[in-house]
């Protein structure tokens, strides 16, 4: 059987999903710009941050974001507590309590800080 057709062990398809609690602020929209809203669980925002101990390495991490009060996120929100789910095996190399990050949606639209790691699980 060619190597590309050899089935992978089940563990090779599993990805760790890390959950972090963070406090974020979304920049207010520019004058005349529509104030966009992001529903609970949005994947429209990515977390952009540097790798701990390696200041030259940065990454945008795809993230599902949920407000603790289950309301949508809105441009101009400040000091909002969220839970972020990051499906990336190296998430903990970039995110940890006290780490600052920017929120990205084609451009930087906000910032935040991690308050704690909540939980992680495996996703298939």
Image: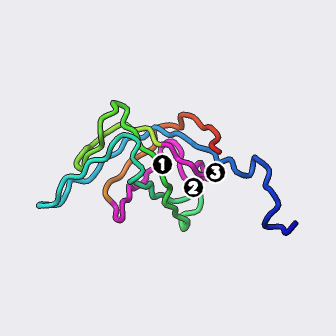
Instruction: Give residue 89's position: percent from left, percent from top.
Output: 63, 51
For disc 1, the neighbor class at 10 Å (few under 14, some 14 to 19, many from 20) is: some
- Residue at horizontal 44%, vertical 38%? 83
Q: Nearer the viewer, residue 9 or 48?
A: 9
Reading the image, the residue beneath label 1 is: 99
Q: Earlier in the sequence, mark 2 or mark 3?
A: 2
Q: Earlier in the sequence, mark 1 or mark 2?
A: 2
Do callouts 1 and 2 mark residues in contact (Cβ within 8 Å)? yes
Residue 11, placed above or below residue 117: below
Reading the image, the residue beneath label 3 is: 89
Label 2: which secondary element: loop
- Residue at horizontal 51%, vertical 41%? 97
Q: Nearer the viewer, residue 20 or 34?
A: 34
Image mark for residue 52: 2
Q: CA distance from mark 1 to mark 2?
A: 9 Å
For disc 2, the neighbor class at 10 Å (few under 14, some 14 to 19, many from 20) is: some
């Amino acid at each position: 059987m060619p190597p590309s057709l050899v089935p992978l062990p089940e563990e090779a398809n599993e990805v760790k999903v890390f959950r972090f609690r963070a406090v974020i602020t979304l920049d207010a929209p520019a004058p005349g710009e529509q104030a966009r809203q992001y529903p609970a669980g949005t994947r429209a925002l990515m977390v952009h941050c540097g790798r701990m101990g390696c200041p030259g390495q940065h990454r945008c991490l795809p993230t599902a974001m949920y407000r603790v009060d289950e309301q949508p996120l809105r441009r101009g929100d400040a000091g909002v507590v969220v839970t972020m789910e990051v499906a990336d095996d190296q998430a903990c190399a970039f995110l940890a309590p006290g780490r600052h990050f920017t929120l990205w949606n084609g451009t930087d639209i906000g910032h935040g800080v991690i308050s704690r790691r909540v939980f992680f699980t495996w996703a298939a």
